[in-house]
Structures are given as structure tokens and as C-alpha cells.
Image (spheres, rainbow, N blue to C red):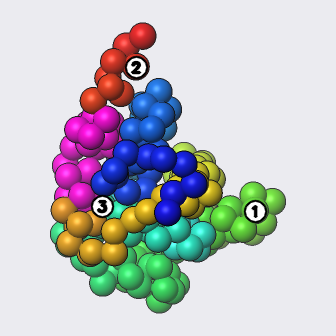
């Protein structure tokens, strides 16, 4: 049961955005930039970073919704998403993404856990400064999002089909557009 009263039938962060729509737009804009904006990492790779961090934070809603978005970007490859969550070092992803996931895991534990050696290992695998920067910011942001969702005790469905469908919508439309579908006042708040 949520710690605050959120609109009926809106799980996870969706209910929180509907509760406080003035926060929905800037948070969704940040996520759109980080996970969908121009970058040499694909949207699927960036969603895997968000999914991994969310799984390490044990945030059921976020790891499942971002895992579904990742799978939608990765031709429905749910097995790869599960591999990354369970043991990214053995997952079928590039060595560069493995190095970046290693950095993301360190950020999840605490920003000061990231070492020069971690950054050097990512650079050795071809990671650019922007990719390293964005990995750290994705990881830090998802620690915030995970704590936001779980700190207010939001409810979430346990139906994998719900996450798959929502994941396809977000992968196709983006976070701002997808959120506007269930928080219409978000557009009104953002124009003020």
C-alpha cells in the first residue's frame, strides 16, 4: 500500500507523476535525454544500464519497466535483459558495455566507489568521456528514481505482459510523450 494516496490504478512512478504532475515533465525530460537522446550508446544499452542499477537497488517496478523498454529496443531479447541483471560479466554484451555496467554498479554503491582504474578499463574498451559521464548520470539518476518509487511504497503489477506492453509504448514514443498519455495536466503545468 502506498505511503501517500496516489491515483487508483497507476503503478510505480506513474502514480507519483499523476500525484505531482509539475515534477513529471522535468524528470521525464531528464530520462528522455539520458536514455533516448543522441548518444553513441544505443537506447537499448542505456536502458540496460538503468535496468541493472534498478535491479541492484531491488526496485521491482523500475527494473521490470526499464527491462521491458530495453527488451523492446533489443528485438524482444528478454533473456539478455535477465543475463545483465544476474551477471552482466557473462552476458552477451560488448566489453565496453560490461565496463560501463561495472562503473554503474559502483555508482549504485556510492559515487566514490568509482576508481581511475574503472574509468581506464572503460576507456580501454573504447568508451568515450560522454559515455562514461552518461553512465554515471544514468546510474545516479536511477538510484534517485528507485528510492522515489520505493520510498513512497508505490504498488506495482507483477504481470510481465503489462511491463512488455508499457515497454513497447515507451520505446516507441519516449518518456515525455508516454507520460502525457496518463498525466494530461503535465502539458499544462510545463507551459506555465
Label 1, secondary structure: give it. loop
Residue 189 is tagged as 2
- Disc with the residue nearer the chain's start (2 vs 3): 3
- Image x and y of residue 38, in percent: 37, 40
- Image x and y of residue 171, in percent: 25, 53
Q: Residues within 10 Å of mark 3 (few under 14, many from 20)?
A: many
- Is residue 170 part of the magenta span, yes or no? yes
Q: Residue at x 51, y 86 (%)?
A: 87
Is residue 71 in sight in this rendering? yes
In the rendered picture of this protein, how many numbered marks are placed on residues? 3
- Disc with the residue nearer the chain's start (2 vs 1): 1
Q: Residues within 10 Å of mark 2 (few under 14, many from 20)?
A: few
Compared with 89, 138 (above or below) is above
Compared with 45, 23 (above or below) is above
Distance CA(mark 2)–CA(mark 3):
26 Å
Which is nearer the eye, 152 or 134?
Answer: 152
Is residue 122 toward the left or the right of residue 62 in the image? right
Is residue 123 toward the left or the right of residue 126 in the image? right
- Image x and y of residue 99, in percent: 57, 71
The span shown in magenta is 166-183
Residue 69 is tagged as 3
- Image x and y of residue 100, in percent: 55, 65
- Magenta span: predominant SS is helix
Label 3, secondary structure: give it. helix
Residue at which label 1 appears: 110
Distance CA(mark 3)–CA(mark 1):
26 Å
Q: Residue at x 26, y 75 (%)?
A: 160
Which corner quadrant of the image does residue 46 belong to? Answer: bottom left
Amino acid at each position: 500500500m502506498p505511503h501517500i494516496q496516489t491515483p487508483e490504478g497507476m503503478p510505480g512512478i506513474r502514480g507519483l507523476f499523476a500525484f505531482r504532475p509539475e515534477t513529471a515533465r522535468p524528470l521525464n525530460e531528464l530520462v528522455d535525454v539520458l536514455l533516448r537522446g543522441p548518444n553513441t550508446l544505443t537506447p537499448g544499452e542505456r536502458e540496460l544500464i538503468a535496468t541493472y542499477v534498478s535491479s541492484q537497488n531491488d526496485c521491482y517496478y523500475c527494473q521490470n519497466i526499464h527491462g521491458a523498454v530495453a527488451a523492446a529496443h533489443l528485438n524482444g531479447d528478454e533473456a539478455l535483459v535477465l543475463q545483465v541483471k544476474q551477471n552482466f560479466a557473462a552476458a552477451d554484451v560488448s566489453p565496453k558495455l560490461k565496463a560501463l555496467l561495472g562503473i554503474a554498479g559502483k555508482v549504485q554503491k556510492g559515487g566514490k566507489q568509482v576508481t581511475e582504474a574503472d574509468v581506464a578499463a572503460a576507456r580501454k574498451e573504447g568508451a568515450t568521456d560522454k559515455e562514461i559521464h552518461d553512465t554515471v548520470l544514468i546510474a545516479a539518476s536511477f538510484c534517485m528514481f528507485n528510492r522515489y518509487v520505493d520510498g513512497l511504497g508505490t504498488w506495482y503489477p507483477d504481470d510481465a505482459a503489462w511491463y512488455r506492453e508499457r515497454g513497447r509504448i515507451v520505446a516507441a514514443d519516449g518518456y515525455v510523450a508516454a507520460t502525457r498519455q496518463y498525466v494530461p495536466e503535465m502539458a499544462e503545468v510545463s507551459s506555465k
